[in-house]
Amino acid sequence: MSARVGGKLILERMKNVSMFVAAESAVKAAEARGAKVLEEADADRNKLNKAVEELKNWVTIFEEVTARASKDEVRAREVAEVRYGLTTSLNQLKADHDWMRDHGIGHIVGTILDAPENATAVNELKDRARQAGFKSRFTDERSGFHGVDTEALYAAAVDAYNNLSISAVEDIEKCLEAEDYIDRLRLLFDRPEEEDEAAGGVKDDAGTSGIKAD
């Protein structure tokens, strides 16, 4: 082998070695870059996981706050409903009281005084009282009530009046025994003048049951 050929082979081998070294360096550099990329990816993944956990925590907190707010809203609504109910009941009681004062008591008294049973009993009581008083001023023979015990008749008339039963009063008592007694009394009396008054806006109250009278 000539020196020339040997030198050429040596050069080629050196060239191959250089290429191998360069390739190996390139591989190592690529591996280093890959490792760095993986490291950065791991760091980013850790940051992402941390962000996800924080987001989950915020979601949990938000759900808890929302749940508490919902409960508070329910309680507030319940309180408002109770307050409204109490206010309505108080207004209703006042309206019922006003109606009884302005109309109910007068109707009851008028019904008793105007009842036919009461008128008959009162007339009987007056007659017996007049007879007893008239006889007391004269002798038995001159009084015109000879042999008549006018005092006993008067006492019987008083007893009958005290035990008088008036059908209209029984109807009133039935109304007063009911919870919606104001409504029942209104329906019982049902005076046209009250209807005109209510239509004019002076009165427009509901009874104890919450039903407005016609």
Image: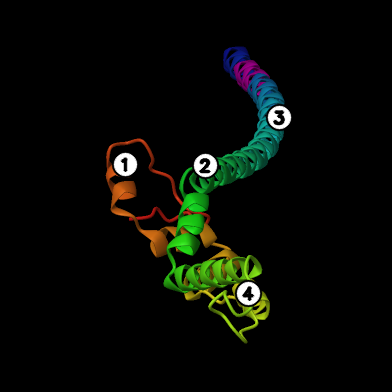
| Residue 209 visible from this viewpoint | no
Whichever of callouts 2 and 1 sits on the residue coming sooner in the sequence is 2
Within 10 Å of disc 4 (Cα), the crowding (few <14, some 14-19, many 20+) is many
Residue 119, percent from left and from top: 45, 68
Whichever of callouts 4 and 3 sits on the residue coming sooner in the sequence is 3
Please identify, in this view, whether the residue under mark 1 or under mark 4 is nearer the observer. 4
How far apart in space, not on screen, are marks 4 and 2 (Cα)? 41 Å
Residue at image point 47% right, 71% down: 168
Residue at image point 49% right, 69% down: 118
**Residue 78: quadrant of the picture:** top right
Q: Which residue is mark 4?
A: 154
Whichever of callouts 1 and 3 sits on the residue coming sooner in the sequence is 3
Q: Which residue is mark 1?
A: 197
Whichever of callouts 1 and 4 sits on the residue coming sooner in the sequence is 4
Residue at image point 63% right, 17% down: 22
Q: Is residue 35 magenta?
A: no
Q: Which residue is mark 2?
A: 98
Whichever of callouts 4 and 2 sits on the residue coming sooner in the sequence is 2
Q: Amino acid at mark 4?
A: Tyr
Within 10 Å of disc 1 (Cα), the crowding (few <14, some 14-19, many 20+) is few
